[in-house]
Image (spheres, coloured by chain):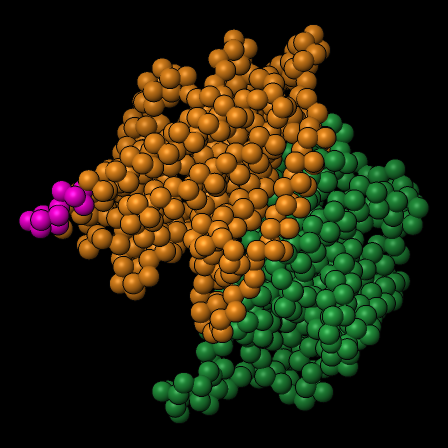
Amino acid sequence: MRMRLALAARCARGHRMGSNYPRSVRRCLPACVLGVEVVLVLIFAFFTSYDPSPKDQKMVLGAYQVLQDFTIAAALGLGFLTSYWRRHSWSSVAFNLFMLALGVQWAVLLDGFLSQPFPRKVTINLSSIRLATMSAMSVLISAGTILGRANLVQLSVMVLVEVTAFGAMRLTYKQVFNLDDHRSMMHIHVFAAYFGLAVAWCHSSPLPQQKEVQEENVPVSRSTSMFAMLGTLFLWMCWPSFNSALLDIANEKKNAVFNTYYALAVSTVTATSVSALIHHQGKINMIDIHNAVLAGGVAVGASCHLISSPWIAMVLGLLAGLISVGGVRCLPVCFNRVLGIQDQSGVHYTFGLPGLLGGFTYMVLIMLQASGKPRAGYVMLIDAGALSFALAMGLGSGFLTGFLLKLRIWRAPPVVKHFDDQAFWEFPHLAAGF
Amino acid sequence: MRVTFPLMAIGLEVAMIVLFWLFVQYEADQTISQQLNTTRPTKMDSFVQLYPLFQDVHVMIFVGFGFLMTFLKKYGFSSVGINLLIAALGLQWGTLVLGLLHARGEKFHIGIKEMISADFSTATVLISFGAVLGKTSPIQMLIMTILEIAVFAANEFLVAEIFVASDTGASMTIHAFGAYFGLAVAGVLYRSGLREGHHNEESVYHSDIFAMIGTLFLWIFWPSFNSAIAEPGDHQYRAIVNTYFSLAACVLTAYAVSSLVTYRGKLEMVHIQNATLAGGVAVGTCADMDIQPYIAMIIGSIAGLVSVLGYKCLTPFCATTLRIHDTCGVHNLHGLPGVVGGLASIVAIAVGVSTIAMQAAALGSSIGTALVGGLVTGQQK
């Protein structure tokens, strides 16, 4: 009943201020998306070909299994992870699929062009699709900060810019810092999280009415929280594949799987118990679980092949869990409010902070391995440079994208329609009561 | 229901057990015990390598199709539950019928390929189930499972052994067949009293998210579906890559067209749930051919376009004028894209090989047998 009244009040308010009605994207969206698709088909037609090398069934299916895990993590995991807003679940899941499909197509081309001289055709094999899925995941991670406040046109612009920026960053890593695929890919969390935060910072619009709207739409309801748990679980299960996919040496791959597995387990236990500990009645908060259980996997990502015994990974998982739960409690109050960032889905403490922790851990481990050797300082410097480059690249391109998305030509939804599926979806049934 | 359904289900199950006892044997792999060091790929190798693909197809059948149909607000239990029942019965019956046909009535062996084919044969029934969703009882569904799989096996035999047409991802033999069979049944079962629609035939917010789970599972595993029975090596690789890019292109087109045909450029959930998958259906037949990725993307885009337009225009037209009420819109998700796939394969083959006629015959026979079989099945009720 109260909800109906609130809805009626909102409708009345919307009536008075006609501009609150979301602007039609009927011309803008189909034109943009179909245009992009036509361009992609043309580029594919002229610049791609199949992989001509002879293939063995075992190799094909092995590569395909890993790709499959990635697609599950990206489409199901990240899609449902952000679906916990009460009135924004449809958009979270469906826009995620859209961004994945667009991001993969663009990333396959971009990776191909950047990794070889231009006139040659890009060969498409399963591992290039796998890399492209990873690049697209950077968009899906950072979209968490802006979902609910952007329409599909803005999100497609963001996909194109961010995949390009990420490709440029990986190229720089390869050529300047001399990092391999695994190392450069594991900066994805830091890059994506700070990219997202920068975009969110540009989009924060602290209008007086926004608070009221968000109180109505943003809260997490029980059933949508279950859907978010579905996403969390699928991400949790596929994380060992994610961390180990780009390692070539069998021993490193094995270590990566083990370490990720244990770090995830420890961060789950830590997150659950700490969440109960800091609640004044000892109850467990579902939001902590959604975000913090993944922190271990993020933190161990960069160094998972170096860690030789499980206890180090477990300590890392413990720290990541603590940082992440602490982030859930402190960041919205201290950090986000001061800077005016709205990070509702907690990208900062799920991916950003654990990613930084992982970067520091990697430096420490390399230092310990190289201590006594002459080039220890240099190696350390390179790693610190790589980490801060990811941070700077994320923030820089994020600000750029943020300002680009603020342009009025994208027809962004008005503030009262933020976190509201009705702005984007045709409801055949009555919109009240969902 | 209390007496008929259990009696019938148990009776069918007993019949299955007896038939399995008479006809089905395990595959015996002599080479494993004798020559462990051999480099020649054994049947066991192929079993272990194909098992993950079988698992993916299994997820699609049970989770994907099951949850895709949970969008009705009061029919979620039945969608998932009857889906499970049909698939469990269908895979036993499918194993038997396909095996008996290919072995010409002799005893036959089952291996991983037979298991995958059996899962495929249940997919036809699940697709047809989508057309009659909410309008049939479990007993009717049991009858439909038995009849439809028998007709499917006959058509598949015709296509694969007599026409020798290529249909790796089974756009024609499964998707088009299942859709038109379901439409024929739905046409027979039409009740003019429900011309204005039924008040239960709508979705609520959460039922649509559940349906989205089904969509995502189907979307993720569709490359496995199209590549599961492809020849190992190059064919399988091409089937995976083509399906993947076809699906990706289809997603973009489906969103764009959905926004184009809806008021104020909004999106419609039913389009997103279904039309994003049309690319996988359409590329099925030519998935393993040496078309380039961009052709796959074009096929996917056309399928997405056709599918959304089908939902927008054809479904209301069918319901009012043709008197066929198609609950899930399987015609738009499986029927039309299946036909697109068949046509695409004809065009793809037109370049060099001389089996166009056979490919066309395969498409025609799939739709023809489906319609006849569906009409007959509908009359039985």
Residue occupying the point 38% across, 29% down? A395
Q: In this rendering, does residue B206 appear at all?
A: yes
Q: Which residue occupies the foreground of this view, B132 or B313?
A: B313
Q: Residue at x 29, y 34 (%)?
A: A388
Q: Where is residue A385 in the image (x, y as percent from the top left)?
A: 25, 38
Quadrant (top left/top right/bottom left/bottom right) for the N terminus of chain A: top right
Which residue is drawn at the image coordinates 70% and 12% (left, top)? A18
- The chain coloured green is B
| A206 and A393: which is toward the camera | A393
**Chain painted orange:** A
Say which quarter of the image contains residue B1.
bottom right
Magenta residues span A370-380
Q: In this view, does A407 lie to the left or right of A384?
A: right
Residue A55 lies, in percent from the top left, at 49, 72
| Residue B76 in view here | no
Against B315, residue A403 (above or below) is above
